[in-house]
Every structure is written in C-alpha cells, then in structure tokens.
Image (spheres, rainbow, N blue to C red):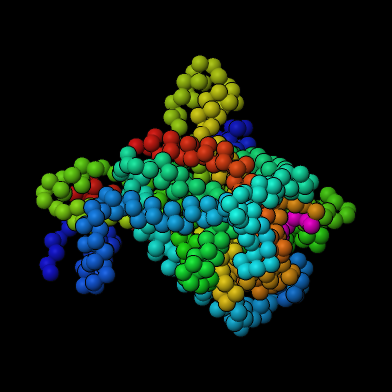
Amino acid sequence: MLDRRSRLVLTAMAFAFAFLYIPIVSVIVYSFNESRLVTVWSGFSLKWWRELPQNTAMVSAALLSLKIAFVTATVAVVLGTFAGVALARYKRFRGRTLFTGLITAPLVMPEVIMGISLLLLFVMLERLTGWPERGFTTVAIAHVTFTMAYVAVIVQSRLVTFDYALEEAAQDLGARPAKVFFVITLPIIAPALVSGWLLAFTLSLDDLVIAQFVTGPADTTLPILVYSSVRRGVSPEINVLASIIVGIVTIGIIIATLLLQRRERIRRREAWTG
Amino acid sequence: MARPARAYLSGEESRVVGFAEGLHLRLLQFAPYRGTIALGRRVGITGARFVIAIPYVWLLLFFLTPFLIVLAISFATPTEMVPPFSFTAFADGAINLAEAVGKYLFLFSDSLYVSAYLSSLRIAAISTVLTLLIGYPLAYGIARTSDRWRVPLLMLVILPFWTSFLIRIYAWIGILGETGLLNQVLQGIGLLDRPLSLLGTEWAIFFGIVYAYLPFMVLPLYATLEKMDLSLLEAASDLGARPFRAFLTVTLPLSLPGVLAGCMLVFIPAVGEFVIPDLLGGSETLMIGKVLSDEFFLNRDWPLASAVAVTMLVILVLPIVLFQRLRARQAEGEG
C-alpha cells in the first residue's frame, strides 16, 4: 500500500527517468528511418546502418579516438593511483594543500579554460624545444591531466576504508615495501583501478572541447568530426553512430553489473564456508 | 621463479597482481627503468616520495604552468606574427601599464563581454536550480528503495553519462525543433495548435545543461541521503512531526553537503559551457565560453582570449574553493 508521499516520489522518479531516456530512445528509433529528415518518420529502413561503415573519415576518426583513449586511460590510472595513494596515505607533506587543490580542480574546471591554457603551453614548449607536435601526443597529455583527477578520487575513496594493519603485518613478516604494494595494496584497490580506467577511457573518448583546442590539423578525433557534421545539420548517420555507442555501453554496463554481483556472491559464500 | 600461493586472493585479483609483478620484473631488464629507480634511490626519492612526486610534477607542468602562461599572455599585445602576441608593453625596462592592463579595462567596459559574463552566470544558476529540482527526488527515491533495486536504478542514472555527451545534446535538436518530437506530441494531444519554437532559445540551453549534468547532481545527493541515519526520522515522527515537516527539519539539512557539492559540480562547468549554447541556443544567446573560443579561433586575439579566461577563473575561484572544502571534509569524514 503506497501512501501519498511515496506516490509523489515515484511520480517524480518516473518523470526523471523518462526525461533521461526519451532522447536516447528517439535517436535509436530514428536511426532506422527511411527519410533523410531526422524528425519525420517515413518508414523502416537499414540504409543508414549500411552507409556508416563506408564513411571512411568517421571510421578512421573513431580508431584515432580509441587509440588516444587507450593510452590516456592507461597513463591516467598509473598517475591517478599514485595521487590517490598520496592523498589517502600521507596526511602531511610539504605542499600538500597545493597538491590537493591541483588534483581536485580539474574535476570542475570549465573545459575552455583547460583547453586554452594547455594549448598555450604546448605552443610555448614547441617554440622552445621543438616538442611536442600538436596531434596525438598533445591530446593524450591533455586528457591524462584531467582524467587522472577522477582516478585519484576513486582510488582515494577506496583506500579510506582500507585496513592498514594488513600492510603492517606484511612488513612485520619481512616483505619489502614494493612487495607489500604488489601483494596487499594493489589487490585491494584493483576494483577502483578497473573503474578508474573505464572512466578515464570514456571521458577521453567523449571529450570535444579540450581536444579541439590542443589537436593539430592532421588528427581529427571522433567528437570533433561529429561536432562539425552536427553543426552542418542533423544527419541519420549520426543516429546510427549514437545507437552503436549506446549499444556497446549498455552491454558493457550489464556485464560489469553481473560480474560485480557474481564476485559479491563468491565473497559471501567464502565468508560462510571459510 | 616460483611464486607463493596466495590463497587469500581471488582468481582475478591474483591475475592482476601477477601481471603487475611480471611487468615490473620484465621492465627490470631494461636499463632506463633500472636507471630511473637507481637514480630515484640515489637522490632519496623512494617509496612515499616517489608516489607523491610523479603526479605532483605532472600536475605542476601540465596544469599549473599553463595557467601561469595564460596569465602572462593576457598582459601581452596582439600582433600579426606567429605566435600572435608580443610583450611590447614590457619592452625597454619600463612597463607600459596602460597597454598591459588595457584589455581588462576593455573587458569590464564593453557591454558585449559584461553581458556575456552575466548571462553565463544567470543561465548556469537557473540550470543548476532546475537540475536540483529534478535530481533531488530522484536521488531521494533511489536512496529509499529496497536494496535490490538500488544498484540497478543507480546504473540507469549513470548509463546515459557513459554514452557520448555530444550525442545526448544532439538528440535534443531532434526533439525540440519545430517539427520535432515534443511539438508532434503536444500538437497530437491537442495542447498546442501552433508549433512551439524552443530550439534556439534559452529554454533549449536549460534542457541541455540539465540533461548533460543530471548524474553529477544525483550521485553526491544519493551519497549523503543513503548514509543518513533513518532512526532520526522515526524520532521526529515519535515527537509528533508530520512527514513533510520531518523532511524539512531533518532530511533536508542533513543532505545539505550533498546539495552543495552537486550544485557546484553543475554550476562551475556550466558557466564555461560552450557546446550546449552553440548547438541548442540561438545566435542571440551569448555565453562566455563561446566568446572565448571565438576570440581565440576566429579573431586570433590570444591576449584577449587569455584575459577572458583569467577573468572567468577569478569569478569561479570562490565556488571552486567551496567545492574543494566540501570534498576534503567528505574525504576525511569517510575515514
């Protein structure tokens, strides 16, 4: 039996979820539209799905974006883990306040500010040293800089609930610090590393503004290409691309949820029997 | 090399550890890797210092230094050269103050820039309030459902965030247009007789910002609401408070840190937002992010664009510091 208050909350939730999902569903539906006009339904067709793979510019931009995202996520996980460990573990060191500020600022910094400042840095560096050439490298460096903040926050919150007695015990038993890190700390923060990597990968894949500032003329990432084609007008091919992305993400999230649940079940069973 | 069995690790965990250890051992064969570690030991950078120093140096080089460069270039003079600025105001020893700070005076006196700043702040503030109004009931509802539903519902909130930001904004073009879904539905059920033109208005920008940033509001709100001690509500109702009054006097104040954190996570990036007004807003809506990129890319006036960025940062310093305080307190509170 629902009282009036629960019904109010449920209505608000239903409204919010409809708001979240109607745009996504409409994009998927219209990717099967016969007509070039995105807003007028004129019959079911797969022709836009057949045409997308032939769009070589889009395919190569997608490959470039995936490569950048892979490099970014991998470097960001290493740097972000160090930063997260530093924040959670070392309560006082010289310059900690500045360090904390530098870590958390990229979480909220407007993208145009990060874009313009990194571009100016790269321009100055290139004039002074001849490195880096704008393109893949500069986009990856820029993406690492803002995604490592997210990794650091995830790792830090995982470490806050961490029992340091485990590390001390390993040390007392004669393990060297590097060994303690690999055998004790790393397995415990492993889930945080996985979600940090995935988040960094997605953020890098999705970034438009910063990439637009720091990339060179030769390297067009997928968001830059999509943006310029959207500005020229809506196109059914973008609907197909959107549907593919939504499909991949949905499958990924379902698999992740199932894996987490299975892990949780194994843990619980071991806790009972062990 | 035989490794000890690690009975306390699950299969996946021991694979991760094995991989990391193997990588370390393999990299030890390479002189640069060994050299870096040896060099670190010699200058006293081991363990703790190494862990702090690496991200610290990265952030100093790629996050702090760029801001200092922007600040410096904002005092330069635009030229036709490559790069298009020079420090003529600082030539021959004496500083030409009027030339150096002239751009800032220009920014504050020119109505275009002042109104762009004001409308950015106004649009970001209104969007933040709208996001809170939609996000609060959502977070509240999820935090109060049964354990079984909580994770799937949270996943449903986060899922759109993992798909492309650009495509989520693009979807609204098809919905808000004159022949779009919204108008078709509203006309179909007879609420409207003429199509409503939302695309190109400020309302379209509000829709876009609320839509793009909703998860950033819901997650911190959920975190505070979920942690709340429900016996406080029972106490309030035992003392005769009606549910709504109990909500106003107990739940709302206790969730205030989440409200503030969520609002900062939406408001600060929204002020500099540039894609949403460009795609959904009309040509008459000026937001400062758009002005900045136009000055930079179209007019190639790097010093003026830098001055716009510096001014935006100065305006946002207060909310950013507030956000950092909130985060620091929350991080300490968890431990």
B280 in magenta: yes
Q: Residue at x 49, y 25 (%)?
A: B233
Please tell me in which quadrant of the rendered image residue A222 appears: bottom right
Percent x, y of residue A20:
62, 53
Residue drawn at (25%, 58%), measured in percent from left and top? B40
Say above or below: A127 vs B295: below
In the displayed structure image, the side of residue A131 where residue B247 appears, left or right? right
Number of labels in the image equals 0
Q: Left or right: where does residue A201 sit relative to residue B281?
A: left
Image point (54%, 41%), residue name: B320
With B252 as the anchor, is A70 left or right in this view? Answer: left
Q: Which residues are magenta?
A: B277-283
Residue A258 relative to residue B184: left or right: left
Q: Which quadrant of the structure image shows residue B83?
A: bottom right
Q: Residue at x 77, y 68 (%)?
A: A40
In the depicted structure, whether residue B8 falls above or below residue B327: below
| Image position, residue A83 (x, y; %) | 37, 51
Q: Is residue A214 visible?
A: yes
In-front residue for pair A138/A111:
A138
Which corner quadrant holds the C terminus of chain B? top left
Which is more toward the observer, A96 or B196? A96
Asked if residue B266 shows in the view, the reply is: no
> Measured from the top left, where is residue B331 in percent x and y?
40, 39
Residue A24 or residue A136, whichever sits in front: A136
Q: Quadrant of the N terminus of chain B?
A: bottom left
Q: Is residue A135 above or below residue B170?
A: below
Is B17 part of what is drawn in magenta?
no
